[in-house]
Amino acid sequence: MLEYQAAKDLLNNKTILVTGAGDGIGRAASIEFAKHGATVILLGKTVKKLENVYDEIINAGYPKPAIVPLDMSGATEQNYIDMADTIVEQFGHLDGLLHNASQLGALGPFEHIDLTSLEAILKVNVTAQVIMTKSLLPIMRKADHASIIFTSSGVGRKGRAYWGPYAFSKFATEGMMQVLADECDNTSVRVNSINPGATRTEMRAKAYPGEDPKTLKKAEQIMPTYLFLMGDDSIDTNGQALNAQ
Ligand code: NDP
């Protein structure tokens, strides 16, 4: 979907939360959403990275973002409920949620899957996203139109040898998307997933250490699909699994 052209003011007056906003695709999406007029809530683990994205957005003259430092591997349901309360106090409602943060974990044969690491990956990639979505849905329903985007992967749509827990978690992501989209059908909330495709980030470099990163698209280049799903041009799109490339 690289050809979609977003209007400059596509996201004016929208408040959008991005997880994993400090780096890679989440960083690029946060800046792109702000560039198109959104107030972005930057959620992530490493505060310094979030502050850098905050400064980039401010220096470019885009709407002032907010920072939420949160490690999704340890966060409780109460943390997400408190976050929803703070968002409603400050912004009244939430228009967009990009579930982008995830953990790759170790790749390797099925017999070598380590239970502790399996649980850690599922906690961040699945459980935390369920709890966060559950806590934020009431304040998303207060928006005229709200968009939830889950981030999938090629290995979340077709299993591949040695991709282990990461692949299982991405199948669960597609499942969450489909179940919630069906529940939200004909409501003001729409729910879809994006497979970013091979993108030049730290996670990709970890998964493919032998690859030349210059052969890959930069995160900034795959943003049209993210903009399309976040903006009102996609009001009638629900339950779809899209590819960014
Ligand atoms: P990166 O590893 O570059 O960035 C991931 C971001 O998620 C980081 O900002 C990281 O924060 C944050 N994060 C990780 N764990 C947690 C946690 N426990 N709590 C809060 N934040 C956390 O990944 P990409 O940008 O490459 O990937 C973004 C999404 O796209 C992922 O869902 C990934 O699975 C998916 N994807 C990526 C592809 C690619 O080619 N790059 C291909 C297919 C799918 P910090 O930096 O502080 O650790």
Image (cartoon, rainbow, N blue to C red):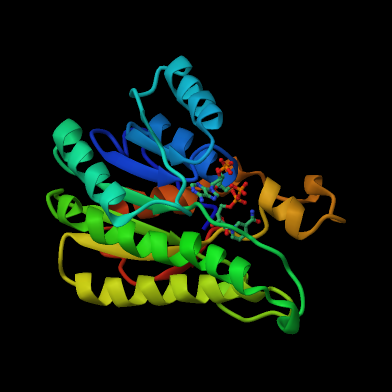
- The quadrant in which residue 196 appears is bottom right
Q: Is residue 195 left or right of residue 39?
A: right
Is residue 200 in view? no
Q: Using the image as rendered, state which of residue 80 and residue 17 is in the foreground.
A: 80
Residue 31 in the image: state x and y as whole percent.
47, 33
Furthest-right residue in view?
210
Looking at the picture, how far across and down is residue 132, in whole percent? 32, 56
Q: Nearer the viewer, residue 161 or 56?
A: 161
**Where does residue 216 sit, x and y in percent of width and height?**
73, 51
At 46% across and 75% down in the image, what residue appears?
A: 172
Tell me if residue 114 comes above or below residue 23 in the rendering.
below
Quadrant for residue 18, please give it.
top left
130 lies left or right of 142? right
Measured from the top left, where is residue 75 in percent x and y?
A: 39, 51
Residue at the farthest bottom position = 111
The image quarter in which residue 183 lies: bottom left
Identified at 60% across, 43% down, the residue is: 24
Residue at point 42%, 61% (across, down) = 150
Question: Up-down: is 109 above or below 50?
Answer: below
